């Protein structure tokens, strides 16, 4: 039995929830090695810093874009070995989903589906520099989402109790 809603299933029950990934794409990729080739002569081991950001937007009534942006900065001493920034995007069809479930879908489920593609693209880009690939660690997007929602709840009193955090879905985006 399939978990996917087929067109026949949708025709029988037009109010059934729909969630489908329609497209995955590399939206942006930047790689800098500002101190090459001299940095290759360094003997010290590199230090790696990773920053992750999740975003999303409505493209149409039932079509949404979800993105994950990762910035990896690797340094040897005070010199940058490489700086990689990549944004992995995906287009998702989401329909007949309660409004309170939209943020978790966009902030947890969609990024979890996109992250393996992003990890592979980062590793591939770094390998092309003649350096060993960097395999990003797994990310618990649920914990990240809950942390951001808690931060938004703490900031809400300062913003007159506004309930929309704007963290997962950009400000101004309308909810169904």
Image (spheres, rainbow, N blue to C red):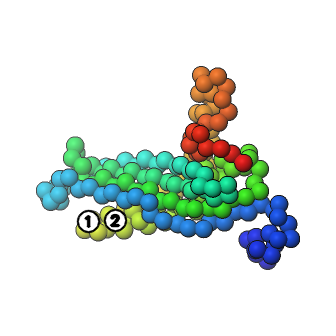
Characterize the local packing of mark 1: few (<14), some (14-19) or many (20 or more) Cα atoms within 10 angstroms.
some
Residue at screen point 57% across, 62% down: 91
Residue at screen point 29% across, 69% down: 128
State the mark number for residue 33: none
The picture places residue 110, in percent across and down from the top left corner, at 60, 58
The residue wearing badge 1 is 129
For the N terminus, the image quarter is bottom right
In the rendered image, the vertical position of residue 149 relative to residue 73, given as above or below: above
Outermost residue on the right side: it is 12
Position of residue 138 in the picture relative to residue 17 (left or right): left
Outermost residue on the front side: it is 60
| SS at badge 1 | loop
The residue wearing badge 2 is 125
Residue at screen point 31% across, 68% down: 127
Q: Nearer the viewer, residue 6 or 139?
A: 6
Q: Nearer the viewer, residue 92 or 111?
A: 92
Position of residue 172 in the picture relative to residue 101 (left or right): left
Q: How many marks?
A: 2
Position of residue 19 in the picture relative to residue 89 (left or right): right
Tag 2 near tag 1, CB within 8 Å:
yes
The picture places residue 152, in percent across and down from the top left corner, at 60, 33
| SS at badge 2 | helix
Asked if one can make out residue 108 in the rendered structure from this viewpoint, the answer is no
Characterize the local packing of mark 2: few (<14), some (14-19) or many (20 or more) Cα atoms within 10 angstroms.
some
Asked if one can make out residue 138 in the rendered structure from this viewpoint, the answer is yes
The picture places residue 53, in percent across and down from the top left corner, at 49, 47
Residue at screen point 67% across, 55% down: 61
Measure the alpha-carbon separation of dots 2 and 1. 7 Å
In the rendered image, the vertical position of residue 175 relative to residue 87, given as above or below: above
């Amino acid at each position: 039995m399939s978990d996917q809603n087929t067109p026949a299933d949708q025709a029988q029950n037009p109010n059934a929830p729909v969630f489908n990934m329609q497209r995955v794409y590399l939206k942006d990729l930047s790689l800098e090695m500002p101190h090459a080739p001299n940095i290759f002569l360094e003997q010290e081991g590199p230090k790696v810093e990773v920053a992750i950001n999740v975003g999303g937007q409505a493209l149409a009534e039932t079509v949404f874009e979800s993105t994950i942006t990762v910035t990896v900065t690797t340094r040897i001493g005070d010199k940058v070995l490489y700086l990689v920034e990549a944004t992995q995007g995906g287009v998702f069809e989401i329909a007949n989903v309660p409004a309170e479930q939209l943020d978790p879908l966009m902030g947890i489920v969609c990024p979890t589906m996109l992250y393996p593609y992003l990890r592979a693209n980062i590793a591939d880009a770094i390998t092309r520099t003649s350096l060993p690939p960097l395999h990003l660690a797994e990310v618990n997007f649920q914990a990240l989402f809950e942390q951001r929602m808690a931060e938004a709840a703490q900031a809400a009193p300062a913003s007159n109790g506004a309930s929309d955090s704007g963290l997962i879905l950009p400000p101004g985006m309308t909810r169904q």
